[in-house]
Image (cartoon, helix red, strand yellow):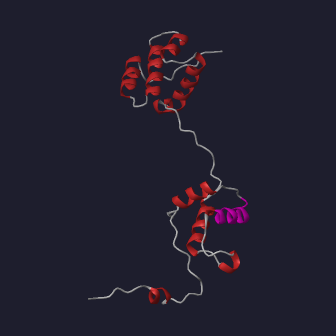
Amino acid sequence: MPTVELKEGLSAAEFRAEAGAAKDPNQARRLLAFAAIRDGMKRGEAARIGGMDRQTLRDWVHAFNERGIEGLVNRKAPGRVPKLSDVHRAEIKKLVEQGPDPEEDGIVRWRRVDLVRIVNKRFGVTVDEDTMGRVLRKLGFSHVSARPKYPGQPDDAVASFQKRSRRN
């Protein structure tokens, strides 16, 4: 396998200076291995200095040639794609803010299990209750819920049943 040439531009001393200034220790190791290459060391020995094998060093040389010094930092893995899109979350937020319709939904307040069922029915997405709790927290809702209110209750009913303290 032919040796991949290291892009021109930095000397061994400059690679060492960049390694000294690097915040990422892995980037610093790779820069020191490149300094060893610039000094004329064999690739296998330079790879050992950087704590890697020859193939890994070759891969990092490609990364450096394409993206420069910043290409020597491990990129963060993108992670798993969320099951609920931004559109889904916006609809869940609107649904929670409006509250359930007692006649259509058969309940007077939303619970996570109810929202899981609705999301599965409307969007065809299966999530568990813990995931729904995290989604609700990110949307700004807390786990504390208000006591349910009977839909036909008059507005002044609560005030008329409150105890009034006597004034002396």
- Most frequent secondary structure within the magenta stretch: helix
Q: In which quarter of the image is the C terminus?
A: bottom left
Residue 141 percent coordinates (x, y):
51, 64
Residue 123 percent coordinates (x, y):
71, 62
> Residue 23 appears in which quarter of the rendering?
top left
Q: Compare residues 13 and 77 and report the one nearer the observer.
A: 77
Look at the picture and state if 67 lies above or below 9. below
Look at the picture and state if 74 lies above or below 120. above
- In the picture provided, is 90 more to the left or to the right than 32? right
Which residue is pictured at 55% across the width and 72% down the height?
97
Look at the picture and state if 61 lies above or below 156. above
- In the picture provided, is 133 more to the left or to the right than 11? right
Q: Is residue 152 magenta?
A: no
Residue 136 percent coordinates (x, y):
55, 61
- In the picture provided, is 167 more to the left or to the right than 119? left
Residue segment shown in magenta: 113-124
Residue 49 percent coordinates (x, y):
48, 14
Which residue is pictured at 69% across the width and 80% down the height?
103
Which residue is pictured at 47% across the width and 19% down the height?
34
Q: Quadrant of the N terminus?
A: top right
